Structures are given as structure tokens and as C-alpha cells.
Image (cartoon, rainbow, N blue to C red):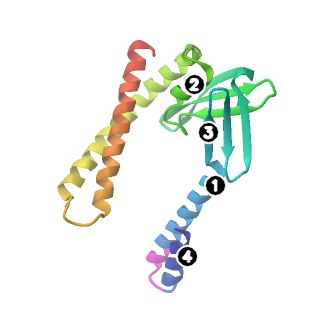
Amino acid sequence: MLSCGIILTYMTWDKIFIAKFFVVLVYTLTLGTIIFLVIKLRLLFITKDKLTSLYLFRLKKTTILKDEITTSKWTTWDVKEHKFITLTITDKNKNQISLSDFEFENLDSIASSIIGDNYFDKSISHFKAQAKQNNSLTYFIAIITTTLLIFSIVKLDLNKSFNATHAVFIFSILTILATVKRIIKYRHIEKYGI
């Protein structure tokens, strides 16, 4: 993407100003995305007895043995209209690993495998607050994505090779499935508290 951005910038530099503006904007967004991924990309390894967090590009590795965990602290934080939950795990050597549902879609199953099934006792208020705040935004995303899916179905031509319409169609289906899963989860939390 960087190579394409550089080539397009070079090719259009003496051309129309508006084209230069958009090419430079795309190049800047691409560069920003790559820098963000380099800083934030992390792998998480969970085994029966330990939890390992590895930041590939920062060369930072943190390992916590499950039997040495001393505290697990739940917090919530907001990004505009959306609430996220973070679990911070600390061991007796003061090593910390923070996990968030911003990074991991399956935070509740990760927490269950690390802390045990009683993790929900301490986190129920955070999950209820998240379900209450995120519910309307999740419905909005489902409606918008369903509309996008309908428009892509109308334009879809299966006889043509893969193009943007096919990509939008696949993206819409995946987004709707993830959104419906979240809606069911939020309803279950609001109704039963789990």
C-alpha cells in the first residue's frame, strides 16, 4: 500500500490539485494505519498454566502464570457512544496484562479460561453498563448494514469476476452476523444478568 501511495503521489504531483489531495490523504491514512498496527499488534497465548502477551514489533513479552495471579481488575472506558470493558491481570511479581473487548471479541471466554467461571461475579456491573449503552448503536449498525446488503444484492452480478460489490456483499454479511451475535449477548445480559 505504501508503494502504491508513493507511486500515485509521484504520478499525480503535477496533475490536478484535487487528485493530489486525495492521493496524499490516502497515503497518509495508509501510513497511519501501518504505524498503528506496528505499535498495537499483539498476540495472546493462553495455555493451561500461563498467559503470554507478545507485542511483535515492540519486542515486548509478558508472561503470567495462572497460579501466581494476585488481582484481576475490571474497568470500562468510552469511545464516543460505545463502551468497552478492560480486564487487567496482575501477578505477584507486579507483571500486568490488560485485555479489552476492543481488541478481543471473545473477552468473556478469555476471562473465563484465565480466572475461572466466577469472573462474571466481579464484572457483572460493567457488562450491564456496556449492554445498556451499546444496545442502540448496535441496532443502528445492524440497520445500516442490512440496507447496504440489500443494495449490494441488487447490484451483485455473479457472472463477473470479484469486484467491489462482491466485497461489500461479503463484508455486510459478516458484519450482520457479528452484530446479531452482539444483540443477542446484550439482551441476555440485560434480561438474566449473565
Residue type of the residue flagged with mark 1: Val
Q: Is residue 160 left or right of residue 43?
A: left
Q: CA distance from mark 2 to mark 1?
A: 28 Å
Q: Earlier in the sequence, mark 1 or mark 4?
A: 4
Q: CA distance from mark 2 to mark 4?
A: 45 Å
Towards the viewer: 112 or 24? 112
> Where does label 1 land, which residue?
38
> Where does label 2 land, which residue?
113
Q: Who's the residue at 56% across and 19% down the image? A: 123
Q: Are marks 2 and 1 in contact (CB under 8 Å)?
A: no
Can you name the residue that lies furthest to the right here?
A: 93
> Where does label 4 land, which residue?
6
Reply above or below: 84 against 38.
above
Q: Which residues are magenta?
A: 15-21
* Secondary structure found at label 4: helix
* Secondary structure found at label 1: helix
- Depth check, mark 4 against mark 3: the one in front is 3
Q: Who's the residue at 68% across and 54% down the image? A: 57
Res. 69 visible in picture: no
Percent x, y for residue 137? Answer: 39, 35
Q: Who's the residue at 29% across and 58% down the image? A: 166
